[in-house]
Each structure stands twice: as C-alpha cells, then as structure tokens.
C-alpha cells in the first residue's frame, strides 16, 4: 500500500522570513495582506496569496508598504521568491492577469 506524501510549498513570508503573517514575530507591526488573501488560497500550492504575492497591493516587502500591482510588478519580476515560484510551477505558472481576477480584496486587520 502506497502512502501519499503531501508536501507544502514555501510561502513568501516563510521564504523572506518577514514575520508579518498572523501570529508572526512582527505581526504587531502590521499583518501583510498576502497572508490573509483568501481568493488566492491554493494558487501555486501556497496558503492564501503566499505563492502569488506579486499581484496583491499593499504588501510589506522589505519592511515597506508596496503600492498597487502596476506600481510594484517590475520589482517583483526581479524578486528571488517570484523567480523560484515561476521555476517550480512551470508550465502551470498562472500569469498575473488570471491571479488578479481571483483577489477578494480582503481587509487587513488593524
């Protein structure tokens, strides 16, 4: 009898070790909207938008609030995490336009 082994893929807050997820070491400074964006849950095998962070506005990358998708996407394309996900998910990598249509605009808790 074969056992199915399920491996979870790393999310951006784990990869970057930012601590801005709910319950994270720096959550008291603000929870990143990526960690609570339910509309992208499961995309590329991640939790919430954890493996599609580049399409979420207001992310807390490098300790600074990022802008809208249009304003931040060029820097996201150069991000080591973005490149990792793109490589791991090829050829199933979803383009940003598809992902943007799934965002639920979850409000970040104060």
Image: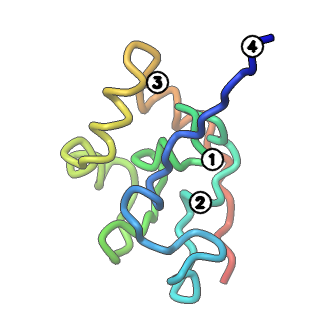
**SS type, badge 2:** helix
Residue 97 image position (x, y, % from top left): 45, 29
Front residue of 102/40: it is 40
The answer for how far apart the CA atoms under marks 4 and 3 are is 31 Å
- Disc 2: CA contacts within 10 A as few (<14), some (14-19) or many (>=20): many
State which tag comes first along the sequence, 4 or 1. Answer: 4
Marks 4 and 3 in Cβ contact (< 8 Å) = no
Marks 2 and 1 in Cβ contact (< 8 Å) = yes
Viewed as shown, does residue 34 lie left or right of 70? right
* Circle number at residue 35: 2
Image coloring type: rainbow
- Residue that label 1 marks: 47
**Residue shown at 37%/18% (left/top)?**
90
**Residue shown at 46%/24% (left/top)?**
94
The answer for how far apart the CA atoms under marks 2 and 1 are is 7 Å
The answer for how far apart the CA atoms under marks 4 and 1 are is 26 Å
**Residue shown at 66%/84% (left/top)?**
110
Quarter placement of the N terminus: top right
Front residue of 20/5: it is 5
Between disc 4 and disc 1, the foreground one is 4
Residue 76 image position (x, y, % from top left): 28, 48
- Residue that label 3 marks: 94
Marks 2 and 4 in Cβ contact (< 8 Å) = no
Residue 22 image position (x, y, % from top left): 65, 72
State which tag comes first along the sequence, 2 or 4. Answer: 4
The answer for how far apart the CA atoms under marks 1 and 3 are is 15 Å
**SS type, badge 3:** loop
Q: Residue furthest right?
A: 1
């Amino acid at each position: 009898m074969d056992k199915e082994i399920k491996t979870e893929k790393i999310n951006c807050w784990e990869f970057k070790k930012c601590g801005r997820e709910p319950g994270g070491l720096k959550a008291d400074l603000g929870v990143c909207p990526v960690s609570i964006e339910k509309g992208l849950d499961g995309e590329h095998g991640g939790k919430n938008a954890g493996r599609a962070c580049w399409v979420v506005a207001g992310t807390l990358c490098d300790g600074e609030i990022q802008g809208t998708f249009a304003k931040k996407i060029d820097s996201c394309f150069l991000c080591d995490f973005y490149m990792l996900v793109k490589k791991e998910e090829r050829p199933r990598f979803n383009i940003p336009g598809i992902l943007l249509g799934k965002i639920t605009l979850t409000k970040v808790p104060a």
